[in-house]
Every structure is written in C-alpha cells, then in structure tokens.
Amino acid sequence: MREVSVFGDAIAYFNEAADLLELDAGMRRILTHPSRQIIFSIPFQRDSGEFEVYTGYRVQYNFARGPAKGGIRYHPGVTLDEVTALAFWMTWKCAVVDLPFGGAKGGVTCDPSTLSSNELERITRRYAAELVEIVGPDKDVPAPDVNTTPQVMAWFMDTYSMHVRQNMPGVVTGKPLEIGGSRGRVEATGRGVTICALDEMAEMGLQPEEARIAIQGFGNVGRYAAKLFEERGCRIVAISDITGAYYNESGIFINAAIEHAAKVGTLEGFKGGEKMTNLELLTGPCDVLVPAALEKAFTPESAAKVQAKLIVEGANGPTTPEADRIFRERGIVVIPDIMANAGGVTVSYFEWAQDRMGFFWKEAEVNERLEDFLLTNLRQIRAIAKLRGATLRTAAYTLAIDRVVKALKLRGIYA
C-alpha cells in the first residue's frame, strides 16, 4: 500500500487547483513552503515527581491575509509533517470562507488519556510559554483541536497574559464563555458540517427525512453534527468512535448515545445499534457519509466500496488523492474539508472579533452569521465547479488559492 506524507496529499490537491489557475512556478514555490516551523521540547513533572519530555510544534504557514490561525492538538501521532499539512489546510480553509487570517497549526506529541488534569495544565503552560514571542491577537491565534478543550485554551490564555502583563483574551479562541469565549463556538464545526450537507442535499434533491446519515467519529464534530442532523429530520443509521461503529437501520437516538458516552467515556457497550468496525461504517449503506475522525480514512480500497451519494468531510484530510479520484469516477459528491469543517474557524473569527471590541453577540446571531458565511462561499464554490467542470474540492482550492495569491500580489514579496 502506498505511503505518502499527509503534507504530500495536501500538496497534490493544491497542485490540481494551481494547474486550473495556471499559477506560475514562483508563486507555487512560495505557497508550498511554510513561513515558519517551530519544534521544541516540553519538559514537565508528573504528579509522581518523575520528569518527562514531550515534543511541541507550531507551524505558521502563511500571513498574506492576516494573523495565522489554527488549532492545537494533543495526540501520540503528532508529527511535524502532520502539523505542516494541517497549517497548509488552514491557510485555504480561512481563505475559502473569506476570513482575514492566514493558516497555522500546533500540537504536542502526547497521549492525554494518560495524563492528569494537573499534568495537562503544566504541559499546556510550558507549551504556551515557549510560543509567547510568536503568538498574539495580531500574530497567531491558536484554538482547540484534537484532545484540547476550552479549559486548555484558558490555561494558554492565562499563561500568555501573565507573560505580557495584561489580559489578552484574543490570543486564543475556543475559550470558556466566562473569559471571552463566543456563544455557539463548541457546536460550530458540527453545525457547519450540517449546514453544508443540507444545502448540498437540497441541490441533489435529497430530502432530510429521506436521508440516512452515517458519521465516523463521535467527538466534538461528529456528536454535534449528528444531533443537528437528527433535529432536521434525518435518520442517523451509524455512529462510531475508537471502540468501533454502531449501526441501526431504523435510526440511532443521538441523545441516548451522547448520554452513554458521557457516562462511560466512550461508546463501548452502547445498545442502540449493532456493533461493527469503522471500515464497515465507511462502506455501509447510507446516503450521506460524514468522516469526522482523523486523516486518511478513505483509501482506494475503501473508496471503491463506499455506498454514500454524498461525503461531507468533517475531519481534516480524510481522503487520499487516489480515493478522491475514485469518488470522482463513481460520481460521489464530496464537500471537501476546507469548506465542510470551516464552521469552527468561522466562529473562532467571530470570537476573536468580539474579544477585540469587548462586545458579545447572542447565540442566534452567531449561528445566523455562520450560516451566511458558509452558504455564501459554498454556493460560490458550486458555481466555480459547474463553470470549470471541476469537483467541489478543486473548486474550493481554486477559490481559496486565488484569494491568497491576490493578497500576496497586492502586498508584494518583501526581499
């Protein structure tokens, strides 16, 4: 089986859109190199008194449209390659929904499930302290990602504020409401997935009450997407997490799954569906499939067996380029990650703006603005796809790259 880096996959998608835009070689070289990559050690003391050292990363990919923006993930699989690819994707994700941000991403190579709350706090504060000089509301604005939470953002914000000797809520987004967070932020990525999916379903003539939805991943994105799909009358036939997948042709009651996961910590032992593997979920019977876990969920082998008519990428990079070509050949519509899961960064932008002006919106206003941002740009992508005979993915990259290139050309290259 082919093994290419995550960043290599991201570049492949970029090149396809760059060809369509007839981008010159010099601009391609600029856009395929990150502005800054930082790797550093995070020594910390466990509750037992033992010392350990983890590795921290922050990649600031592009600043052409504004401060860098991107999450922080805590996961054993975090690597420089992965973080660079995710920062690359964030550049296009911010551009595709027309936010005044560049792209960034960060992470720590650790397993949070083995760490106490005190240990997590010490790691987070050390991570933040290492980045004080290069992050800030006008430099780089981190946010939650895999295994990081509003509490982690609160620790990061406090550490940064202590170092600069003033309260700086705008240094991160995804914070608790009490210290400058935005209403609607926690649900935003899942809500965005649902907004994009329902709009494309309407385009395809698929009514919500007729749709069978399968969702891989029951974290922040998958859980809220499932709940919102259910509220719109869709039937959720499959959900999954690290313990496996659960299938029920009659429909899974999402509140029961959420309650079970809250009580047990995972979906293990959930009685609302028949147990199956995550691969069986991806290739099982459904109309709409939402991969909302980690990268590379779809390989050529699994893509050939997918039964869904529409794939909405809640995760970052769930589809390899080879799998994407198979979806194209089979006529399966894919709403790409840079558009489908942009709800989180869009409401992060709203939070950053609210922090800077010290005035906060009601949740209904946040949700209304979110829908407007997403649908305005999704429909633009759809129009480009039809005009150029391209997939939604290529059209999304085309729109995003064009916006970044225009900003770069207007600013010029400082040399």
Image: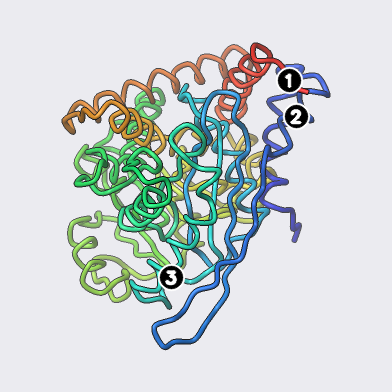
Query: Can you identify the residue that label 3 sits on?
Result: 112
For the point 41% across and 36% down, which residue is it? 345
**Quadrant housing residue 245:** bottom left
Query: Can you identify the residue that label 2 sits on?
Result: 30
Secondary structure at numbered mark 3? helix
Q: Are marks 1 and 2 in contact (CB under 8 Å)?
A: yes
Q: Is residue 396 left or right of residue 300?
A: left
Q: CA distance from mark 3 to mark 1?
A: 41 Å
Query: Can you identify the residue that label 1 sits on?
Result: 413
For the point 45% across and 45% down, which residue is it? 142
Tell me which numbered mark, 3 or 1, is placed earlier along the sequence.
3
Q: Nearer the viewer, residue 48 or 81?
A: 48
Q: Quadrant of the C terminus?
A: top right
What colouring style does the render use? rainbow
Q: Is residue 61 left or right of residue 353?
A: right
When the figure is inspected, residue 388 is found, relative to residue 245, above or below; the finding is above
Secondary structure at numbered mark 1? loop
Q: Residues within 10 Å of mark 1 (few under 14, many from 20)?
A: few
Let me know if residue 379 appears in the view.
yes
Q: Nearer the viewer, mark 3 or mark 1?
A: 1
- Which amino acid type is marked by label 3? Pro
Provide residue 193's location: percent of width, then percent of height.
38, 38
Secondary structure at numbered mark 2? helix
Please state the total of marks drawn on the protein image: 3
Q: Nearer the viewer, residue 343 or 412?
A: 412
Tell me which numbered mark, 1 or 2, is placed earlier along the sequence.
2
- Which amino acid type is marked by label 2? Ile
Q: Are marks 3 and 1 in contact (CB under 8 Å)?
A: no
Q: CA distance from mark 2 to mark 3?
A: 36 Å
Provide residue 104's location: percent of width, then percent of height.
56, 41
